[in-house]
Image: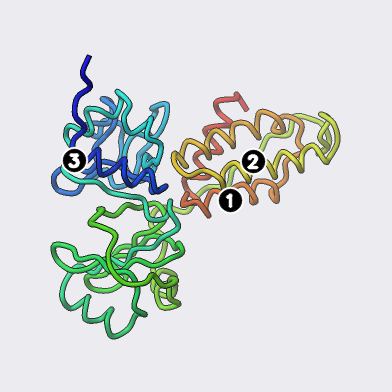
C-alpha cells in the first residue's frame, strides 16, 4: 500500500525535528491545531486562541507549545495526521531548544531593536522581524509597543534559519521580562500528606530519597518534548514512592518545581500537576 505523500508543512516539521527542534502545526491565522478530536474545537477548556494548553484530560498534551515535539514517530502518527491536514504553517517552541525570540511587530519596533539590542540572528516576518538569541527567559507579550518575547511556554512561527551570528540573550531583554508581572492568579501552596513515618523514608534509607529526587530532576531536565506530560508523570512517580511516609519536605518539592520551571512550566502549572498527581493517588 502506497503511503500518502507528506504535506510541505509535515516535511518541514520533520526536517526541523531531525535537528532537535520541537515543532507543532499551525492553522491559518497562526493558531495551533488541536491534535486530538476532543481539543480540535477547544472543547478541552484551553484559552480561545489555544496559545496555551488548558486543563486537558488527554493522555498527553495535544496542542500549543506543550505538544511541540522533535519525535518523528509522534509527528507522523495517526493521531497527528488530521492536524497536519489542517496545517498552514509550522511553529516551534523556542524555549524547548534553548532559544528566545524577540518578536518585533512593526517598523518602529525594528528600529528600536537596531538601536538598542545587540546584533543576532534575524528572520524577516510579514510585519517586522524575529531577533533570535541563545538562552531562555519567561515569555511575555507587549514588553513595549510592538515587542513580544517568546521563549518558554510559547511558540513562534518557523520562517527559516535567519541570517547573522547568534548572540546570548541581552541583559535588556531580561530586564523587560522582569518588569512585566506574571499572568494569572497566584498559585496555592500544595500540602503533602504525611500519614506516618515521622519524616523518615522507610523504603531503604535517606539516601534512597535523595537519589529519587535527583533522578526526578534529571528526568525533567532531559525532556526535549512533551515537557508538560513529563513533569506530571515525574511528580506522580515521586509521590507514589515517597508521598505516603511523610519524608518529602518543601525543599524536595521546591527542587522539582525549579527543574520544571527551568523547562518552561509556570509555577501555576507545577502546582496543578502536583495536586492532580496527589488526587490520582488518592492522597
The circle drawn on residue 216 is 2
Q: Which residue is mark 3?
A: 8
Coordinates of residue 239 in the picture (x, y in percent): 65, 33
144 versus 138 height, above or below: below
The circle drawn on residue 259 is 1
Q: Quadrant of residue 22?
A: top left
Disc 2 secondary structure class = helix
Q: Is residue 92 left or right of residue 195?
A: left
* Mark-to-mark CA distance, 2 and 3: 38 Å
* Mark-to-mark CA distance, 2 and 1: 9 Å
Pointers 2 and 3 in contact (C-beta within 8 Å):
no
Crowdedness of circle 3 by 10 Å Cα count: few (<14), some, many (20+)?
A: some
Mark 2 or mark 3, earlier in chain: 3
Crowdedness of circle 2 by 10 Å Cα count: few (<14), some, many (20+)?
A: many
Q: Is residue 93 visible?
A: yes
Disc 1 secondary structure class = helix
Coordinates of residue 190 in the picture (x, y in percent): 59, 43
Which image quadrant: the C terminus?
top right
Crowdedness of circle 1 by 10 Å Cα count: few (<14), some, many (20+)?
A: some
151 versus 187 height, above or below: below
What is the residue that sits farthest to the top in this orientation?
1
Q: Residue at x 58, y 47 (%)?
A: 189
Mark 1 or mark 3, earlier in chain: 3
* Mark-to-mark CA distance, 1 and 3: 36 Å
Pointers 2 and 1 in contact (C-beta within 8 Å):
yes
What is the residue that sits farthest to the bottom in this orientation?
115
Label 2 or label 3, whichever lies nearer to me, is 3
| Front position in the image: 195 or 227 | 227
Coordinates of residue 122 in the picture (x, y in percent): 28, 69
Q: Is residue 106 left or right of residue 115?
A: left
Amino acid at each position: 500500500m502506497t503511503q500518502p505523500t507528506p504535506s510541505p508543512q509535515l516535511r518541514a516539521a520533520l526536517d526541523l525535528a531531525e535537528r532537535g527542534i520541537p515543532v507543532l502545526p499551525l492553522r491559518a491565522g497562526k493558531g495551533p491545531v488541536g491534535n486530538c478530536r476532543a481539543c480540535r474545537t477547544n472543547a478541552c477548556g484551553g484559552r480561545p486562541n489555544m496559545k496555551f494548553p488548558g486543563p486537558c484530560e488527554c493522555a498527553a498534551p495535544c496542542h500549543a507549545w506543550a505538544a511541540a515535539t522533535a519525535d518523528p514517530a509522534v509527528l507522523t502518527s495517526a493521531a497527528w495526521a488530521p492536524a497536519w491536514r489542517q496545517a498552514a504553517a509550522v511553529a516551534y517552541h523556542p524555549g524547548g531548544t534553548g532559544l528566545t525570540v524577540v518578536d518585533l511587530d512593526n517598523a518602529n519596533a525594528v528600529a528600536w531593536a537596531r538601536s538598542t539590542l545587540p546584533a543576532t540572528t534575524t528572520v524577516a516576518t510579514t510585519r517586522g522581524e524575529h531577533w533570535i538569541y541563545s538562552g531562555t527567559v519567561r515569555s511575555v507579550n507587549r514588553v513595549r509597543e510592538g515587542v513580544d518575547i517568546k521563549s518558554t511556554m510559547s511558540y513562534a512561527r518557523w520562517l527559516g534559519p535567519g541570517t547573522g551570528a547568534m548572540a546570548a540573550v541581552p541583559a535588556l531583554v531580561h530586564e523587560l521580562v522582569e518588569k512585566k508581572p506574571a499572568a494569572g492568579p497566584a498559585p496555592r501552596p500544595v500540602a503533602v500528606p504525611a500519614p506516618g513515618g515521622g519524616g523518615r523514608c522507610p523504603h531503604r534509607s535517606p539516601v534512597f530519597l535523595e537519589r529519587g529526587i535527583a533522578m526526578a530532576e534529571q528526568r525533567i531536565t532531559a525532556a526535549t518534548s512533551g515537557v508538560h506530560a513529563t513533569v506530571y508523570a515525574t511528580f506522580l512517580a515521586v509521590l507514589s514512592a515517597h508521598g505516603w511516609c511523610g519524608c518529602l519536605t518543601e525543599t524536595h518539592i521546591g527542587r522539582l518545581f525549579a527543574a520544571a520551571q527551568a523547562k518552561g512550566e509556570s509555577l501555576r502549572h507545577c502546582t496543578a500537576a502536583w495536586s492532580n498527581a496527589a488526587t490520582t493517588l488518592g492522597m
